[in-house]
Amino acid sequence: MGKKILLIDDEEDILTTLSIRLESQGYTVVMARDGIEGLESIKNDKPDLIILDIMMPNMGGYQMLQKLKEISNQHGVSRLKPPVIVLTAKGEGVRDLFEMEGIADYVIKPFESKDLLDRIKKVIP
C-alpha cells in the first residue's frame, strides 16, 4: 500500500484529476472539500501528506493551517505534521507567508501535475 495523501479542495475537477494521477503513481488518496472535512480526515485517516487549497468555503486553507499548527504545537512538533503542500492561485508575495506557517512547499495554480508529483516525492520520498 502506498503512502496516503489527503487532498483538500472545493473544486471537484481538481480533486478528481489529482486523485487519478496520484493513484496511478501508487499513492492512496483521501479527499475533503473544505478545512473542516480536512481536519476530521486527518484524525481518522492519518495521511502522510496533505495537499491543501487556500480558497475554500466554510473553513479555508489558511484557517486550517492555523488549526493544524495549533495541534502540532500542542504535541511539541515544530513543523506541521503531516507535512503540507499548499495549492494557491496567488503567486507573488505568498512564499514568505507560507514559509512562516511551516508548510513543506507550495504550488501556484494552474500547475502541471508532473511538477506537483516532483514536489510530493521531495516531501515524502
Image (tube, helix red, strand yellow):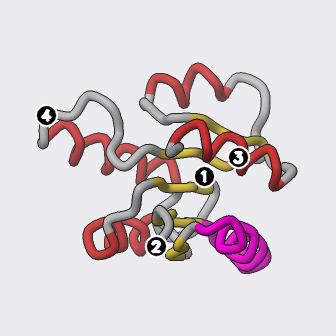
Marks 4 and 2, how far apart at CA: 29 Å
In the structure shown, which secondary structural element does the residue marked by tag 1 occupy?
A: loop
Q: Which amino acid lies under the numbered mark 1 shown in the image of this protein?
A: Ile
Question: Would you say 89 lies left or right of 23 here?
Answer: right
- Residue 54's disc is 1
Between disc 4 and disc 3, the foreground one is 4
Check contact, mark 3 vs mark 1: CB within 8 A. yes
- Residue 1's disc is 2
Q: Magenta residues?
A: 9-26
- For label 2, the crowd category at 10 Å Cα-Cα, with few meaning under 14, some 14 to 19 and many 20 or more, is few
Marks 3 and 2, how far apart at CA: 29 Å
Q: Which amino acid lies under the numbered mark 3 shown in the image of this protein?
A: Thr
In the structure shown, which secondary structural element does the residue marked by tag 4 occupy?
A: loop
Vertical placement of residue 30 versus 122, above or below: below
Q: Which amino acid lies under the numbered mark 2 shown in the image of this protein?
A: Met
Sequence-wise first label, 3 or 1:
1
Q: Position of residue 91 (x, y in %)?
A: 78, 33
Marks 3 and 1, how far apart at CA: 6 Å
Question: Would you say 71 lies left or right of 16 here?
Answer: left
Secondary structure mainly formed by the magenta segment: helix
Tell me the residue at 66%/40% (across/down).
119
